[in-house]
Image (cartoon, coloured by chain):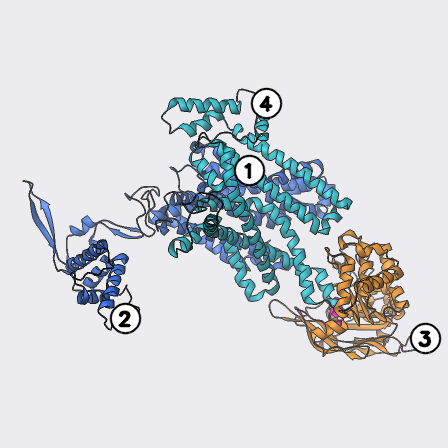
Amino acid sequence: MKGYRRYFGKKIIWFLITMFFAVVLNFLLPRLMPGDPVAGITGRAVSGMSDASVAQTIYNQYAERFGTNKPMYIQFFTYLKNLAHGDLGVSFSQYPRTVADILGASIVWTLVLQFPAIIVGWIIGNVLGALAAYIRKGFDKVLLPLSLFLSGLPAFGMAITLLVVFGINLKWLPTSGGYSFSLLPHFSFTFIKSVLYHYWLPFLSIVLIAIGGQAIGMRSMSIYELNADYVKYSRFLGIKDRKIVGYVFRNAMLPQITGLALSIGTMVSGALIAEIIFSYPGLGSSIYKGVFASDYPLISGSTLIITVMVLVASFAIDIVYGFIDPRVKAAQNE
Amino acid sequence: MKNMLEVKDLTTKYITRFHEDVYAVDHVSFCVKEGKSVGIAGESGCGKSTLALSLMGYYFPPLHYTSGEIIIDGKNISGMSPDEVRLHILGTEIAYIPQAAMNALNPTQRIIRFIEDVIRAHQPKASKKDIYDLARKRFEILNLPADVLQRHAVELSGGMKQRTVIAISTILSPKVLIADEPSSALDVSSQKMVIKMIRDLMEMGYIKSMIFITHELPLLYNVTDDIMVMYAGQLVESGSAKQMVFDPVHPYSKGLMDSIIVPEEGARDIKLAAIPGTPPNLKNPPMGCRFAERCKYMTPLCKAYAVKMTDFGDVDENGSHQGLNRSYRCLLPVHELKASYESEAKGGAAI
Amino acid sequence: MKNSLAQVFKSGKFLVGFSIIVAIVLAIIVYPLLVPGNPLEMIGVGTFFKPGTYISAYDAVNSRSFYTLNLTDAAAKRVASKLSDADREVMLEWFTLFFEENPGDVDLEEMDINDTQTLVTLWWETYDPSIRFDSMTSAKRKYIARVDAQLEGILEDADVIIAAENDDGTLSQSSVILGTDYVNVSDIASVRILPLGTDNFGRDVLKQMISACRTSLLIGLIAGTIATLIGLVLGLLSGYVGGIVDDVIMFVTNLFTVIPSFVLLILISFSIGQEQRGARVVAVVIGVTSWVWTTRSVRAQVVSLRNRDHVNLSKLSGHSLVRILIMDILPYIASYVIMAFILQVCSGILAEAQLSMLGLGPKTTQVPTLGLMMYWAMAYAAHINGAWWAYFPIVILIAIISFSLNLMNTGLDQVFNPQLRD
């Protein structure tokens, strides 16, 4: 038990440290750029506005918020204080809506879309990869290049292809949005049906991409494990092949879990772009809108939320992993 | 005394990626009597590990059975289907201790779960409790702490892992135990413990006979009754441990005895210092004596004719024929070879 | 070294990937020589011209010589090209209603509406403007009447008269173009082949794509080189020196492994601002945010090499740190570094594309990149408008580049890690 406690303790400390640095980076990066960051940020936002007084208001408001005239550490504490209150600032482009308000609406969409899609893709990918490793021959010959192609296809490429084929040519599924334009979000059967109908394409595009990458990883892991000494030894003790395959896949699967914790950031970023293609009302689209309107508070808020999501996800995976892989415990006792 | 293991003209081959046949075990015959142990020595790559695998009668690519018979306690297993072998032979009749015990255990499984899998593969109805009792008793006898059973392999030290593997391999009291360099990767004290453990198992009757494979011929003197030397897929000499260690006849065995290899990491890669050259390519082995190219005493005839294993009169000092026959595979007469060795030892030149 | 190089080129997977990349590089070099000019030139006025050969209508009409060709199928083709899919659907609708009231032996189920001849023949036989179906709206009736009139217009053998303005402002006939008049394409002064049409700004997609491919590959190379260099240096130091250096480097590396690099890319790119963001700047930014994987794998390799005999020997001989790293360690991890580099190039290209899709790519006026082309195609809804040529070739090109690089990598992996072989 001691080993586990140490493992989880380490993971929690590490989680807090990464969280802290993520926040610091989110704070620091825009401020490190040469020139007056407030002028740069607001300048871009207001470049299209004709009303000079509005531009000046935004500049003043933001200068105060940023606190550029104060030393960096004071700025940082102000930033932390605002964060603690859930205050991510006011959006430039959707003034006077707050960023927290805008993101609060979109984060649900992103979570509901990406979380199941990544899990499903991970599971299918692992099963296929394991089969490819076990069967080899024909299945492998087809699956490996296909997976390589799938994982090489950028997420947006998959999204566009699915959209054009199933949405525009076959007209099976809608091409954009998270729900029908004629509806307002509310809790009803019609609305949920519409959401599910709009869910398929973005979901599929993320799943397919995830399958490719995971299948390749699982295939090499399984081949590696199939050649492991314990496989040969178990065989020579008369244990059935089916049982041995069980050992192998369990062992090959475990590194895939940590692999997921490490690659979830990449997967999420790909999926964000897929959201844009489908005009899905999630965080990806929020960033897109933010960039389009040079809405700094919106972008900064979105990136922070995404980072936090990814950190929490990989932390959760690490914790689960700790429970199922005994090697973790052993490593801590050394 | 009855034969526990009888091997007749066993030939197995590897089929490479390029569909070439490599005969790693080439017409090997010998037998092991009840209560006896036989050592097999040879350089790495001589086919001794392949022989160990082949004796199990359970083949998977790239290793393939070609011809010959393996008879375990009167049962001919060569004609059995792989599934019959798996169910009735492996683990119960013949068991195996692998070379690298470090990785022989599934790292993510508790030892007791693995033992359950092993026993249930042969006795599907065995209860958890019976299995646990059996395992605990066996571990106790072998001086292994019982709490090892609840551990995962990753939590055990190297020596402990090796001893656990030995305990698991012999849990079903097999008639023949094949140990493939079980001690080569261990430190000296662990090595001794492992060897003592195997001898205990023999003495207590949990195993009826044993084959011990190593590249260190001298080590076998303390471990086994008889010794065979293997070269390029064939046996080249056999006899009692004492004869083989103190009085080797075949030039290759002689060389093997003369070169003492210190057991350390990477030692398996060291070619015999005393015998220059490398073994022949088994993709197409030479027609004549396979050792001819490296032999100091080679005559033109050696390369022309295939040589057979020949018995020669020397019987065991007890005068009994309980162990292996004293035989060798060389065209030169025994006395000539011995004379050369003697004159060499005195500083003279080879004949 | 020579031996392993030979082995690498024996690997089928590597060879396929390598050949595709070489072919793409050749295309990048050769195509601009064949079709010179600025890839960003807006030649088309209007958006998304479809792929094909464009010949100047002015030059065609004013061609020096007309040739008379009596082609029997010319009229049929003319009709076929004029009848839109919607027209054909409407005609079929008419037939359905007509045969409901006047049963005949025509099998409408079997009818192929793309078979213009059958369609038009049947039309002549059955259509009568005086017939009125109750179920048909008057709008549709009028539409059908228009289709009929159009059909008659096409089939009428009228010539086209070209008129020119006289000095006094009146029109006078300058020439007549007959239905059998043809011009030879080689007589026409201005012909432009647009194999992939034009984009939303009227730019030649193929030309732009070749140039974009070059920029994107360069971005990948620069980003990959930077990432590999950083990763290599950090990995070597961390793995070989160990101790506090290792701790610090691994702390930073682990930190950036979990903080998504894409987020950093967005923040940095946005902070730099559109004006400062050239292709090279974007490449550098991608490079400095994506070195973590290389660091990790290089470190793991170095740790396993650190205590090898030849390294210890060098250490005892008093060789400097740099010399040991370069002479005794680097050669052993070279294959891993190359593999990591290939993957970095690949992810660099993808990162640029993704960044551009967000609108944070290189500034748009200087050079085209694959990501920017995607961005504009999406911004102008090419996928909704059916302008597949504006985005699909790019998706395919990115996929092919990334597929080939991955294939090369897998091939190398199989050569250097024999377990993965078949």
Label 4, label 3: how far apart the Cα atoms are: 96 Å
Earlier residue among tags 1 and 4: 4
The residue labelled by disc 3 is B318
Can you tell which chain is drawn blue?
Answer: C
Measuring from the top left, give residue A91's x and y in whole percent: 47, 31
Q: Gap in Å between the C-alphas at discs 4 and 2?
A: 84 Å
Q: Which residue is located at x 80 percent, y 52 percent?
A: B157
Instruction: Tell me residue A184's x, y (percent).
Output: 44, 43
Chain letter of mark 3 equals B
Residue B184 as seen in the image, left or right of residue C375: right
**Residue receiving disc 4:** A74
Q: Estimate how packed mark 1 is, as few (under 14), some (14 to 19) or many (20 or more) residues with alpha carbons within 10 Å.
A: some
Chain of the residue under label 4: A
Other-residue count near label 3 (Cα within 10 Å), few / some / many at <14 / 14–19 / ≥20: few
The residue that label 2 is drawn on is: C107
Does residue B60 show up magenta in the picture? yes
> Is B276 situated left or right of C216 in this image?
right
Residue A281 in picture, x, y percent from top left? 46, 43
Magenta-colored span: B43-63
Tags 4 and 3 both on a single chain: no
Circle 4: is it few (<14), some (14-19), or many (20+) Cα within 10 Å? Answer: few
Q: Secondary structure at mark 3?
A: loop
Which amino acid type corresponds to the residue marked 1 in the rendered image? Ile
Residue bearing mark 1: A305
Q: Amino acid at mark 4?
A: Ile
Apparent colour of chain B? orange
Asked if the stretch drawn in magenta spans residue C140, the answer is no
Q: Which quadrant would residue C143 be assigned to in this image?
A: bottom left
Q: Colour of chain A?
A: cyan
- Residue A2 visible: yes
